[in-house]
Amino acid sequence: MERKVIDTDVLIIGGGTAGCFAGITLGKRKDIKVLIAEKANIKRSGCLAAGVNAINAYITEGKTPQYYVDYAKKDADGIVREDLLLSMCERLNHVTDIMEKLGLVILKDENGKYVTRGTRNIKINGENIKVILADAVKKQENVTVINHVNITDYIVKDNVIKGAYGFDVNEEIFYEIRAKAVICATGGAAGLYRPNNPGFSRHKMWYPPFNTGAGYAMGILAGAEMTTFEMRFIALRCKDTIAPTGTIAQGVGAKQLNSKGEIYEDKYGITTSQRLYGTVTENREGRGPCYLKTDEITKEQEQDLYKAYLNMAPSQTLKWLEEGKGPSEQNVEIEGTEPYIVGGHTASGYWVDNDRQTTIKGLFAAGDVAGGCPQKYVTGALAEGEIAAEAVERYVDDYNDEKVFDEAGADEKISEYESFFQNPVADISTELLEEAMQKVMDEYAGGIKTDYQYNESRLTLAAEKIKMLEDTCKRLPADSMDDLLRIYELKERLVVCQVLIEHLRARKETRWHSFAENMDYPEKSDEWLKYVNSKMNDGKVEIIFRELQ
């Protein structure tokens, strides 16, 4: 492989929501050299690739940042970092204002005020929100973007970040990127569990299938402390299309309904996990299928739903049109997805301080990879990108470490990449191993097949089987750089699975129904009002318990 060495002040890994906004923020400092490395193309990458139709984290008129903190804390049943939530919430409206000035269309009423959706949301026309962010990044004179580069490993010496290694996904090029500071903004982890839809439709899922947990895996392997992986996120979605349900539930006030015509949401509660758990339970006890009751909405409301879904999940609008019946004529069937690890909705991710610095000096995390701060959504990721960028400015200004690099480490990494091209063709493939991993997680670590339930015996088997798959990965053959990309995406997922299993095993209670349904410990306990953290040492996951802050 051709070898390229790039020297920069700041490396941002991931050009999604948080990564772009970090780049825009650092663009104000023309004396700081910034590089954004993006696996895809920054114009349409990450969770915002296809757009969104609302800002789901906003301090609406009459509310305060603390109001939002209290909501997020209640939804997570207390397992949050209130300091992180507050620092994020204090910037939600500020970053929204910046996005509007960059060209984002925010809907306004006849009085010029933002059109709200509930008490924490405002409506937008957001099909092009990612394009707006990418264009703003490109205007920054001191920010360079390299697309189609997959970063796989941090360069760390004495627990201080020195840069990262990666490779071009199209050409045979090895990258060694040397940096004073690194911001990880790679997103969460999808594809760990068997998804709702099989075969060629398997990637029709809630979270981007290209988000493989790369940032988590890099941090885990480098010895960073992680937090709250056991608080998985499982979305309640429209059946088959896996389109959002919040647009219907909040937009037109649709209630959850079982097949007997009973409204069941009040019976279980209305936090995110309770809405899901109620649906799972109603189905398991024979009162399914379950729906969102929309058959009494007006034709005007129906048109609004058509437009809203065209903005972010066109398949749902197309389904209504193809069936010849809109939501005003038939209720919308709902189902739970497979579990994900994503710090934008739950508290999973890196253990960070209020500057979003991880336990590795000079390594910062923003957006879905940063733990302790759930219910971020788009604006929260923007806010964390800004917080991390401002902290990085200060870090770089005070930087006085020697830029000493380990040539042997680079040689070792390039040899690792090339080893997959030297492996003989075998009867295994990345796709087969990925399916095997998803089957293991689905059956033994609380997937759809077991109604998200697990126990100690199942988790023990899951850990053994995931370890076997990790060992098998070393024999995978690569014939192209795209093959190498798929191998490393699988390796990343397997690392995340390993840590997730240990977190599920460690929390001996059921605090969040469905999100972490531990059948050995089916009740909630005040003894577990604490963080379950972890750190990998010599290939083994060590659990660390921390008191609430």
Image (cartoon, helix red, strand yellow):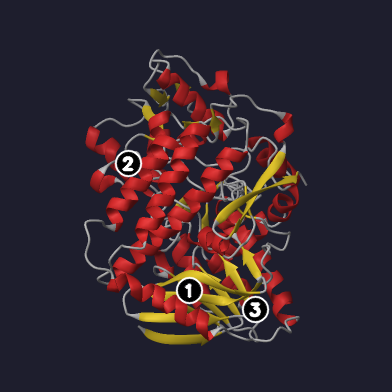
Q: Which mark is residue 28?
A: 3
Q: CA distance from mark 3 to mark 2?
A: 41 Å
- Can you say whether 92 is above or below 182 in the image? above
- Few, some or many residues within 10 Å of mark 1 (<14, 14–19, 20+): many
x 45%, y 74%: residue: 166
Residue that numbered label 1 is attached to: 37
Instruction: Answer with mark 1 or mark 2, whichever residue precedes in sequence.
Output: 1
Residues tagged 3 and 1 counted as in contact (Cβ below 8 A)? no
Position of residue 108 measured from the top left corner of the image (x, y, whole percent): 56, 50
Q: Which mark is residue 402?
A: none
Q: Which mark is residue 317?
A: 2
Left or right of 452, for residue 388: right
Image depth: mark 3 or mark 2 in front? 3
Q: Nearer the viewer, residue 3 or 236?
A: 3
- Few, some or many residues within 10 Å of mark 3 (<14, 14–19, 20+): few
Position of residue 278 measured from the top left corner of the image (x, y, whole percent): 50, 24
Left or right of 2, for residue 25: right
Q: Nearer the viewer, residue 222 or 259?
A: 222
x 33%, y 80%: residue: 172
Q: CA distance from mark 1 to mark 2?
A: 35 Å
The answer to whether residue 328 is visible is yes
